[in-house]
Image (tube, rainbow, N blue to C red):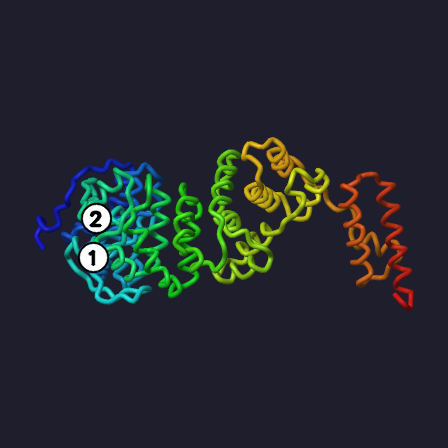
Amino acid sequence: MTEHTAQPKNLAHLDAPWLNEPSLRAVFAALSAAGCEGRIVGGAVRNTLAGQRVSDIDIATPCTPDAVARLARAAGLACHATGISHGTVTIVSEGAPYQVTTLRRDVETDGRHAVVAFTTDWAEDANRRDLTINALYCDRDGTIFDPVGGLDDLTHRRVRFIGDAATRIREDYLRILRFFRFSAEYAEGPFNAEGVSACAEQKDGLARLSAERVWTELRKLLVAPRAADAARVMEEHGIFAQLLGIATDPNALQRLAHIERTRGVPADPVTRLSALTRPDSASAANLAQRLRLSRAEAEVLQNTSKKDPGFNPSSPESAARAAVYRLGKDTFAAGQRLAWAHSDADVESEPWQQRAQLGTSWTPPVLPYSGANIIALGVPPGPAVSMALKAFEDWWIAADFPADRKLLESKLAALAAEAKAARHDPLG
């Protein structure tokens, strides 16, 4: 391949501080020692041009993984085979990992995985990618290579597939979610019509994807700036019905996002999933299983699906304090925002704002007694102790956490006496 073949349609220059990081320069120096060209590709280039944060820096090269590994080690850099079947090795330079992948072309695709062959043609590598804005490259000096028109699309805030949209999707059905995720992140105005149409036509292919891949992509989509816009289009075309098997409410998702912005709360993908799907306890469990949520994520989804009366400012503050005590501050805050989003109340509603504030300003007290106190009152160790303590805690919460010591001692003694009496009652 001549350099002319690899010339981009548009040339620009990237001026980014991370290009001068010593760790990255060391990787480029290692590759160039034997004339091995490397170009940064994908997210780092795209996000820098869009004024967004860069977290990972991936490098493409026409050199084989074996050659890359040999050059890295010759330069004193650690190198690990992290995706060797797809041509990827990870070079660790000054503690920073850089994935270096050999240029590829697809040999065979099945909608989930691809069999690839290595190539030295930059255009072939670009054309196997999904979206034009993800096929931007730059060299170590910041010169941008744009083989498929990604610069113009990024400038005009367009998100579109490379080449024929349906063909790109059939290669990997996860690209349906990636199209909507990147549209929600980068696009302005209506989403690309060809892309939407192709995603709708190919949505049955989502059933072939693993739950882990789906959730990894969906959790990024849910926290994107235009998540609600993407959700509306996906709901309209039956994509969420195929993906989640549950009704969705994009308006509630939009309201939650507005409440989060108003209150300065970071977006949480599980809470937003709960806003979108409005699950009850059973459907929350099914959804957690369907998406293979982690135990912690499933617990958040289950807890926020509870319709606690304390979330709503129409209930007394004592109900809110009880909810904070039982659920914890974080879960109460998330559940309260969800109840707010699902209500008809305005996002500027003073009562709802005050109820939200109570969840952060009030610190739940510690239960003043333990099982040892009940045993000291003559209740033998065993189930009766736990029952008495639970009865005391329920009374204490319902009474709005009284602190009067005489009242507390009197109530505990009465419950202990009841426990002892029940223990000796042959009918108990």
- Name of the residue lying farthest toward the front: 236
Disc 2 element = strand
Looking at the picture, how far across and down is residue 171, in whole percent?
28, 62
Residue hosting label 2: 39
Q: Amino acid at mark 2?
A: Arg
Disc 1 element = loop
Label 2 crowd (10 A; few <14 / some 14-19 / many >=20): many
Q: Amino acid at mark 1?
A: Leu
Residue hosting label 1: 103
User: Which of marks 1 and 2 precedes in the sequence?
Assistant: 2
Looking at the picture, how far across and down is residue 333, in whole percent?
59, 42
User: Which one is nearer the viewer's eye here, 125 or 120?
Assistant: 125
- The reply, left or right, for residue 366 in relation to residue 166 is right
Count of marks placed on residues:
2
Point out the image quarter for the C terminus: bottom right
- The reply, left or right, for residue 290 in relation to residue 200 is right
Q: Indicate which disc residue 246 carries.
A: none
Location of residue 359 (image quadrant): top right
Q: Residue at x 49, y 45 (%)?
A: 253
Label 1 crowd (10 A; few <14 / some 14-19 / many >=20): many
Q: Is residue 334 above or below residue 88?
A: above
User: Which one is nearer the viewer's eye here, 246 or 39?
Assistant: 246
Looking at the picture, how far across and down is residue 309, in whole percent?
67, 45
User: Which one is nearer the viewer's eye here, 50 or 161?
Assistant: 161
Q: Residue at x 22, y 41 (%)?
A: 151
Q: Is residue 194 above or below residue 264?
A: below
- The reply, left or right, for residue 423 in relation to residue 344 is right
One can see residue 78 in this view: no
